[in-house]
Amino acid sequence: MKTIETNKVANQFVFTGKIASISSFGGGHINDTFLVETDSNIRYILQKINKNVFRQPLHVIHNIEKLLNHFANIDQNTLITFPNVTGEKFVEDSNQDFWRLYNFVEGTQSYDVIQNKSQAYEAARAFGSFQLSTLGLDADDFYETIPNFHHLGKRFEKFDVVLENDPKSRIKLAENEIQFALDHRKIAIITSEFIATGQLPVRVTHNDTKLNNALLHYQTGKGVCVIDLDTVMPGLVMYDYGDMVRSFTSPVPEDEKDISKVHLRKEIFEELTKGYLSVLSNVLTKTEKENLLLGAKYMTLIMGLRFLTDYIEGDVYYKTKYEDHNLVRAKNQFALLASLEGQEDELQKIILANI
Ligand code: ADP
Ligand code: GN1
Ligand code: MG
């Protein structure tokens, strides 16, 4: 594969000024992200879409343009994409990789760990506002950019196959985590039966509402916008709520090695629930609201399972920095799920007090 020059790619987009520098940016697990600085002082985010994860990059581009055009029509222009010299919103390089250029949302910051209650409220309010703004969209107009992305049953099927093959002989190093996952398989069964009843509306959802995909104002702390729109596609609100609970409530990063530090902070859970429902309580159905906690269990389990599957398979999906990085991540998710399960009644009361 050729080494692609980011400068050459960036220069095929239409933007203001001349490139001063391009550097790697952010801590996402999926795409290659670069900060582009220019002599005009306007900054940009250049991203290469991970084609191992998004097999149809043009579907991702389609969805994002559909979404951002709709946002522009309702006067929400915080995040925009730029065209290339022939007017398309992407550049394809000689390795058949697809790139896009966003504005850098100035004056904002993203976090890996929530430091105070207000951040939880604001980041959740940003994801709630996002959901509110997508209500005018038709889910049928969006491609599924990763098929069965949040299908827990199918994730377990994949897990079974990987366990059977054990390609890196890692099963023996993850026996407790494998047992934890298998003991929780019933969540997949119960939820899939419930989803099949059609009681939860399919909406255009974000599907990756991880804390560092929300940008907060660096001085006021107010939620400014949400980013990482590659997984915006048909989905359930309980997935988005659940992934916030998963990624906001632990006091340590999702790859903390000292697992004894991992637990669900009830006060952070309460603030995120308040922030999200402050925007959405009038538009979600009763069934959606009553099943938010199921979403939290479901998403924490599915992420633990995905990290564990990737560990056993040999780290083929997530970017990793050391040998058992994915196993550490899986342990974190499972510890968080156990903590959630220990507080379930109190958490459900918090939700019911805010709907
Ligand atoms: P990934 O899919 O790999 O997670 P993201 O789209 O989330 O990629 O980008 C990675 C990080 O880059 C984000 O967590 C955020 O810190 C930063 N980032 C991405 N887009 C923007 C933007 N438009 N403005 C400011 N920061 C951004
Ligand atoms: C990935 O792209 P990023 O880092 O925001 C992943 C999410 C996981 C998350 C776990 C497309 O999110 O599903 O929840 O890592 N995104 C994709 O940290 O797989
Ligand atoms: Mg991200």
Image: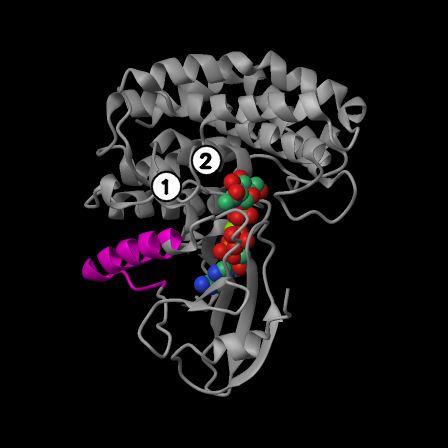
Establish if 99 lies above or below 335: below
The first of marks 2 and 1 along the sequence is 1
The amino acid beneath tag 1 is Glu
Q: Which residues are magenta?
A: 59-79
> Residue at left 46%, top 56%?
216
Q: CA distance from mark 2 to mark 1?
A: 8 Å
> Residue at left 57%, top 26%?
158
Instruction: Decide which of 269, 86 is in the foreground and name it.
Output: 86
User: Residue 308: x and y, percent?
Assistant: 66, 30
Asked which quadrant contains residue 335, the reply is: top right
> Residue at left 42%, top 19%?
348
State left or right for residue 328 relative to residue 277: right
The amino acid beneath tag 2 is Phe
- In the image, which disc is placed on residue 144? 1
State left or right for residue 94 relative to residue 83: right
Establish if 81 lies above or below 12: above
Q: Is the C-beta of the residue carrying label 2 under 8 Å from the nearest atom of ligand 2?
A: yes
Q: Is residue 211 visible?
A: no
- In the image, which disc is placed on residue 127? none
User: Residue 231: x and y, percent?
Assistant: 42, 45
Image quarter (top left, top right, bottom left or bottom right) of the C terminus: top left
User: Residue 14: x and y, percent?
Assistant: 38, 79
* Number of residues whose C-alpha sits closer than 10 Å to that of mark 1, classed few (under 14), some (14–19) or many (20 or more): many
- Asked whether 201 falls inside the magenta stretch, the response is no
State if disc 1 and disc 2 touch (CB < 8 Å): yes
Residue at disc 2, secondary structure: loop
Circle 2 sits on which residue? 149
* Number of residues whose C-alpha sits closer than 10 Å to that of mark 2, classed few (under 14), some (14–19) or many (20 or more): some
